[in-house]
Image (cartoon, coloured by chain):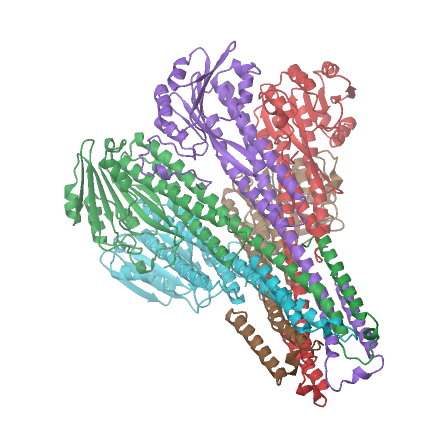
Chain colours: A red, B purple, C green, D brown, E cyan
């Protein structure tokens, strides 16, 4: 499966609007968790079937329904019917190749985002689609697999830390998105540190370094491409007319927009940095080639003429007058030293070494 | 015929507005098919002449008239006159070098799109122009040749799968366009897989690989150029004032716009990727040249001076004192080993190997 | 005279607004032709003086006054005064370095365009400025020299082909501009064919090819620069408030805008293509250098050590034990074959050949 | 800690909106200074605790409260509560990785800016975040450490120089920002001078120069990235609706916008310049390699054939007729001189030297 | 002093709004000239002090006060006070590092422009700031030094050529700006001619040529950067609400805008051209290196094996059978010719020469 696209081949020929999971199944089964909280209370329950979970939803609490695993399309369909969500929204959630997106419906808003991880050991960026459906009192979140990026938010709810228990599900949506965007910055920082570590090794250019540099470029490019559309989605969110998102909480999303901007700028900076390092690598390589060439040329230019002179007097002609001159051998040495000296002087003068 | 332009030479001097087929004839004859469907029924008929087909059109059904082959301008003209379509629309349909386009007329809308195929074996992208004229109850589609990209839609109509039989021809237009855009993603994915396969061979740079890389770049660039204008056309469509496209179906076209955006982004990513691979190729080549140069320089720098020393004692001077020294030969060997050792030490210290 | 600018030096110090021909005189004399047509009739006359031509203009016909040659500023001034055209318009017509432009006056519109030719033999793009002044019933066209790009339009008038005789001079303006823009596409196609022919020769990179590639780049860049401003001018034209251009004909100019867009896109594609070919050329050259280096290194690395061994036994030391060993000569051969074989094995293993 | 991002890791999991210092602590303790001035008077006091400082604030004077050191979040919180500043503003001030920003609140405006220093010796650009909260009669400035960039403004207040004592705290905000932006230009000028000094050394390309060039590129890129967002912040400021910024003083901020534009343009120019110098460096290196190659080739091509000829006559075949010819040795010399001369002529003709 | 910035260091710490000359003093003293003209009359006077000049200003004439030399800030201040010009305008005039700018005040407009000169011998572009203050009946122009770019306009006034004497000072402002913009085109044309002359020398790449190419790039980049902001300033001017600029004359400024556009486009074209030439230079250099390498490899690959063969038979082994074979010497020659021939055939076949 090509990286920049999730496989659409299996969906070929399907009617648009029909619910088909497009992506790679990343976990077995489906995990259904419901968190219900108000100013005073907080309960967490894991359900075996979606029916039970849906029945437990209460109008007097905030309900956070979290679904891990998207391949069970029947389950998704069931949720859709229960809350009267448009098939288009569900289709978007099931197609994990989606760009980040925000759209409003009569009674809900759909917000599709991406979680981005950088695995330092494999030097690979991996992307997961996280989708939210926000209704009055209810937030449904869909993840491709059980992950730990929402744990901090759960802890805040458990411990009634900050304002989270005092506000409604729109604030929860903000808190969850904030933890995703924060993760962008943290992961980018890790990439940045890895690149800076590589920078110091550039003085001695080797094949491995060049390979790694291009890998970084690809990964950052992939990272950037994945987070960029969220900017537009956030813009649309902050202009949403839906009353589900209260005006009081909009300012937080605006703040999030700024952090998102910062993340994109950082990705741009690191992208530019890898480009610069690749260029520096190539320049260093050219410097090296130049140096190698100089060593070769100095050796060859000095010794090839000298060998020629020696060759002349190694010929077996019957009559070579110099061979019989007195001290001819030492004169030859003298000539050779003079030739070599002249050459060295020339190379020195031209700053070859 | 140059690739980025369809031949206009034969049209030179023709009055603008006169119907002339500009392009390459891709099939013999013309194939006329009419599909008529409503909630309950569905009939498919192939006609020998356009007259008969036009007479069969019924107001109580949805009529999909599909014309394969554009070189029969008389036939096109006849259709135009029958439905009172503006000559400009027909001219656009006949000029297969058109960019994707959408425009409205008093009683019809014209939508010009492209089908894009990637032939993996020849590594060639080919483009076909698909044009639609949408009228009340009637959709006319024009193809350059009989192809199979609409087969899934036909099957859905035959099997009354999804909503297609319950909606009007504007939904049919959406379903057909959707199948084209879906094909963009599928074809891009195939290109992407081919490129990724090539990436693994880059370690040992050969002429064939560099040639292929540039071919990919050209093909993706051609692909991108062909699909980009559709974005603008879709924007215009979603803002159309015509009542032929019902508000209820507009949301599907908006969804299509998002998928089209995704396709363009994927094409951009692959384009950037080939660029990176070309740069990586060049860097690998430089690495190789550097390596080759080092081997040469090490060999030459070590053996040329040694050969010179041997040459000195191969001279035939009458008086060369060293020749008569005891063990001179072994001393020479010692000197040579020392010289070679010094050189090797120097190269090692400078990390030449 | 620098190419991207027409000489302004002679105009230095002239009052702005004074009529001065800025450009290169491309023909002797001035040619004055008047074509008068209506639905029923058509006459063509060539006049010796502008006075006679102006007197022949009739209100009951469409009058197309064509002036070849711009250096006769008195003549231009005379026309300006006769039709009460603003000096600024005339100044623009006389300055052949102008960008394409459209502007309206109280009773006339001025439209400045470019004709572009590609001379395949010299591989040179040349530009000519074609200006139009459109008045009620009268279209005046100004060319730098007598050319043949309007011949097809003349033929259509002569033969009453298409709608041209039934419409007014605003349609004539469209028809003439259309023939210019059509020429852009035809000329671009010729450039494209030339480039594609060159592409096949890239496998064996030679100086001549690289020179040609850069020439193409320059010429396409010049082409593109020349046709780009027409887009803006056409936009202004389609928004013109002047009643001289009838609403009915505006749709044709909008169509022209699309073709112009297509021409610019084609120029962009070919520009990108030459860039790619230049890069491919450089990569091929690097491939070649790498190959040459390998041949050199293989030969040198194998034979230099062997020659050294032979040199050792060519020395004239009194006591070299090996020289007297039995079969020493054959042992030396054996050592040499072993050394050469080892080297070849190493090179083969590293995929040097 | 990666450079383009301030460490967010410690903040991970914190509730958004909670006050956490994100950045590197750059000084011990916190320094609290209050400057109070009116047309007639001016007092400067340094306080040990924030309470005392806040109590000293007077409604009849302009109060400039300057806080050096941001790690004491309690102190910041205290200020926030005293002046009823929104937690979001305070959070922005404490996160030193912020982009420049401007936003209004009910009774205050927050303006986040950057001070940029270029350290010529280390060739490093360092950034400090400077934040301002402007209230009626009070301006609070927050710095990461005690610096000297506001000293000129203090002197002007002390000496009642210019209009500063006659205007309110909004003018003070302008004066302080102006001194920051002015510093951008001064620091950029210093970078520019360093680059120009390097330019003169480019004729003899060495590894050190290439390294420095890439360093400059990184630093200027970092500089540019840091000052760019201020442009947007200034735009927002000049459109602020808050009455705290008087219309009379807005013109000064508009002027500042122009200087900021000039600074960005200068950074762009220097960025382009380093790029050009890197390219020139690479071209110079290629020139050098070409030169070195020519020397090698000339020497090798002349002497290798000559050595071959000498080698021929160094063979010990029993019957080599030439060896016995009279003057054969001199004939050999003649042939050698001819060969060498021919080669030299060829190289000269081809402009190798 | 760095080129892209005028020294601001001396102004550091000065109150914004205080009049300080920022720039390089380019002439001794200050030259004050007053030109007064109406339809009928024209007088030119040079004054020793500004007082006298100001007293001579007449309401019944157009007054053009030209000040050469900006370092006398007292004089500028005096003018400002006399005409009640805002300090900000004066400050802008004195800061010669300003970007081109236009702004209106209650009774005046300020227009800051640049004169650009290209010195062909030194291959240097130099910039001078020319500022205008336009009041009712009075135009004040400020130049850094006495120059000759306004001489043509003066001559037109002296000779009452064109409309200049019949119109007011707003037309004078246009005429002067026009002469500056015209100069851009003339200077660009000279740069273009120089570049084209260099292009012909590119076939034999030398260090001097590469150096010059990069110089041209720097100069054109500097040129472009200097003239670009004028476009924005002209846009603002054409939208000015001030009644000092009559509607009747606005059309001239619009025309100027077009010429300015043309100048920027020409600068862009030349910039692109130098880039292309630098690339062509590098390609030519690579071609050269390839050629040199081939010569080396051909010589080395042919003669090194031959020398090896000769070396074999130069050994002094006691028993080398071939040495005693009849005609062995000639057989050796035969082998050598065969080896060399094979090699040459191989090189020929691979198109090495």
> Which x, y percent locates residue B96?
43, 33
* Quadrant that contains the N terminus of chain C: bottom left
Left or right of E250, for residue A121 = right
Residue B96 visible to the viewer:
yes
Check the image and report above or below for D90 versus C71: above
- Number of labels in the image equals 0
Q: Quadrant of residue D284?
A: bottom right
* Quadrant that contains the C terminus of chain C: bottom right
Left or right of B269, for residue A35 = right
Q: Quadrant of residue B333?
A: bottom right
**Most foreground residue, E77 or A244:** A244
> Which x, y percent locates residue D164?
56, 51
Residue E252 visible to the viewer:
no
Toward the bottom, the furthest residue is A326
Residue lying at 26% horizontally and 44% vertically, measured from the top left: C141
> Which x, y percent locates residue D183?
59, 55
Check the image and report above or below for A173 versus E265: above
**Most foreground residue, E228 or D245:** E228
**Most foreground residue, D21 or A280:** A280
Check the image and report above or below for D67 versus A289: above
> Which x, y percent locates residue B92?
40, 30
Toward the top, the furthest residue is B40
**Most foreground residue, E32 or C220:** C220
Q: Quadrant of residue D59?
A: top right
């Amino acid at each position: 499966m090509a990286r920049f696209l999730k496989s659409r081949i299996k969906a070929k020929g399907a009617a648009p609007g029909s619910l088909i999971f497009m992506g790679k199944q990343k976990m077995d089964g489906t995990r259904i968790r419901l968190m219900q909280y108000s100013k005073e209370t907080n309960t967490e329950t894991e359900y075996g079937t979606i029916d039970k979970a849906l029945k437990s939803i209460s109008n007097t609490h905030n309900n956070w329904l979290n679904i891990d695993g998207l391949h069970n399309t029947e389950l998704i369909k069931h949720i859709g019917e229960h809350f009267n969500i448009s098939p288009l929204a569900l289709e978007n959630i099931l197609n994990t190749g989606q760009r980040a997106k925000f759209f409003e419906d009569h009674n809900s808003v759909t917000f599709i985002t991406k979680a981005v991880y950088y695995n330092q050991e494999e030097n690979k960026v991996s992307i997961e689609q996280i989708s939210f459906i926000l209704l009055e009192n209810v937030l449904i979140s869909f993840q491709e697999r059980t992950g730990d990026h929402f744990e901090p938010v759960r802890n805040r709810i458990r411990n009634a830390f900050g304002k989270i228990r005092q506000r409604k599900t729109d604030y929860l949506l903000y808190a969850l998105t904030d933890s995703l965007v924060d993760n962008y910055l943290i992961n980018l920082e890790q990439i940045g540190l890895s690149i800076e570590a590589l920078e110091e090794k550039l003085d001695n250019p080797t094949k491995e370094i060049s390979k790694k540099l291009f890998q970084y470029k690809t990964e950052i490019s992939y990272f950037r491409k994945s987070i960029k559309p969220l900017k537009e989605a956030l813009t649309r969110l902050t202009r949403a007319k839906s009353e589900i998102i209260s005006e009081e909480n909009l300012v937080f999303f605006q703040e999030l927009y700024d952090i998102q901007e910062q993340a994109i700028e950082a990705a741009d900076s690191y992208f530019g940095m890898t480009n610069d390092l690749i260029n520096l690598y190539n320049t260093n390589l050219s410097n090296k080639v130049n140096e190698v060439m100089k060593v070769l040329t100095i050796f060859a230019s000095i010794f090839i003429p000298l060998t020629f002179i020696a060759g002349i007097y190694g010929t077996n002609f019957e009559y070579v007058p110099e061979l019989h001159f007195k001290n001819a051998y030492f004169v030859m040495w003298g000539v050779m030293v003079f030739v070599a000296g002249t050459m060295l002087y020339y190379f020195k003068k031209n700053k070859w070494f």
